[in-house]
Image (tube, grey):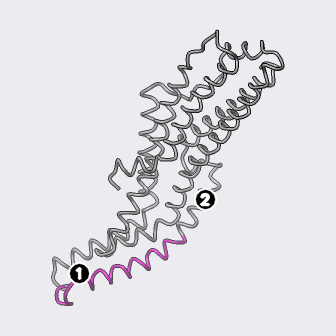
């Protein structure tokens, strides 16, 4: 790396951005069981198992409430077809609570497979690093002391923007992972609403929301791939321009692309909901 302070500051900001992109790539392609060596997952499964008992109790409650609201009298319940329908609903609702964790993990694995397919179809094994162009490094190093003063201001502002965008983006990706954990832990309670016909919409909304959180990963991967293609084609640099103008033009376009990526990552849940009609 160059000994010039301006070059070092810009490259350090880009290194932070590259590191966060690599971290995102690792998190998106990782399963919840393997995240943080499975320490968080063991706690989530423990909470899920403890809430299953509450889920079974609510299952009976929602079932009884559903029977009272959908059946006009006890004689209607004794009809064979109605009794069979209620029995099947109760058994299926109990199975959803008992095997809800396995079902949710199976859907997450499907989404992870979709993400893997997206990555392999375009030949992406990882994201390319953003590196300061040689022309800009040379132009900065050729500047004198007084010519470097505007570069310091441009570098400080641009580097600060890149740092902030890096952490905003990584927090959004971590937020998705935490939402998956919370949905998994609390699942037995909303899934118990499938026992009653009047309350089953709560369970459906829960599953749709969980599916949306899982699919956010695919949107984030697509956004990162598109950004990587944009970053792989750096803006044209005018060798006759002043060093400050050259650096400002490069940083401005880079930050613009970063803003698009961060905005897409933060709105991934909204994009998925619009696609799913939620």
Are there few (<14), some (14-19), or many (20+) residues within 10 Å of tag 2? Answer: few
Are there few (<14), some (14-19), or many (20+) residues within 10 Å of tag 1? Answer: few
Q: For the magenta stretch, what is the residue range?
A: 50-76
Depth check: give the residue in front, 232 or 96.
232
Tags 1 and 2 touching, CB below 8 Å: no
Q: Is residue 256 left or right of residue 145?
A: left
**Eyeballing the image, is 140 above or below 82?**
above
The local secondary structure at tag 1 comes to helix
Residue 111 x %, y %? 43, 45
Q: Is residue 128 left or right of residue 105?
A: right
Q: Residue at x 45, y 41 (%)?
A: 219
Residue 147 x %, y %? 78, 19
- Marks 1/2: CA–CA distance: 40 Å
Count of numbered labels shown in the rendering: 2
Q: Residue at x 48, y 47 (%)?
A: 267
Of the 4 image quadrants, the one containing the N terminus is top right
Q: Which residue is mark 1?
A: 70
The local secondary structure at tag 2 comes to helix
Q: Is residue 10 left or right of residue 32?
A: right
Q: In the image, which is nearer the foreground, mark 1 or mark 2? A: 1
Residue that extends furthest to the top in the rendered view of this protein: 240
**Eyeballing the image, is 81 above or below 16?**
below
Residue that extends furthest to the front in the rendered view of this protein: 146
Residue 185 x %, y %? 53, 64
Depth check: give the residue in front, 198 or 12.
12
Return the disc, 1 or 2, that comes first in the chain's sequence: 2
Q: Which mark is residue 42?
A: 2
């Amino acid at each position: 790396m160059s000994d010039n302070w301006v070059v070092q500051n810009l490259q350090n900001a880009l290194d932070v951005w590259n590191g966060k992109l690599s971290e995102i790539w690792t998190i998106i392609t990782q399963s919840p069981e393997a995240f943080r060596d499975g320490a968080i997952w063991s706690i989530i499964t423990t909470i899920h198992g403890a809430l299953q008992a509450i889920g079974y109790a609510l299952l009976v409650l929602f079932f009884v409430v559903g029977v009272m609201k959908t059946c006009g009298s006890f004689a209607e319940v004794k009809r064979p077809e109605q009794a069979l329908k209620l029995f099947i609903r109760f058994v299926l609702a109990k199975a959803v609570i008992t095997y809800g964790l396995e079902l949710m993990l199976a859907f997450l694995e499907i989404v992870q497979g979709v993400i893997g397919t997206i990555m392999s179809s375009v030949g992406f094994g990882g994201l390319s690093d953003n590196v300061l162009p040689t022309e800009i490094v040379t132009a900065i190093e050729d500047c004198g002391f007084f010519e470097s003063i505007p570069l310091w201001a441009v570098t400080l502002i641009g580097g600060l923007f890149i740092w902030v965008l890096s952490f905003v983006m990584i927090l959004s990706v971590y937020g998705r992972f935490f939402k998956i954990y919370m949905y998994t832990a609390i699942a037995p309670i909303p899934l118990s609403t499938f026992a009653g016909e009047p309350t089953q919409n709560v369970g459906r909304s829960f599953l749709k929301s969980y599916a949306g959180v899982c699919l956010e990963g695919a949107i984030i991967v697509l956004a990162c791939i598109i950004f990587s293609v944009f970053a792989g084609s750096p803006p044209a640099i005018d060798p006759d321009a002043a060093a400050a103008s050259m650096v400002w033009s490069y940083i401005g376009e880079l930050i613009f692309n970063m803003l698009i990526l961060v905005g897409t990552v933060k709105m991934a849940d909204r994009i998925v909901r619009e696609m799913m009609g939620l």
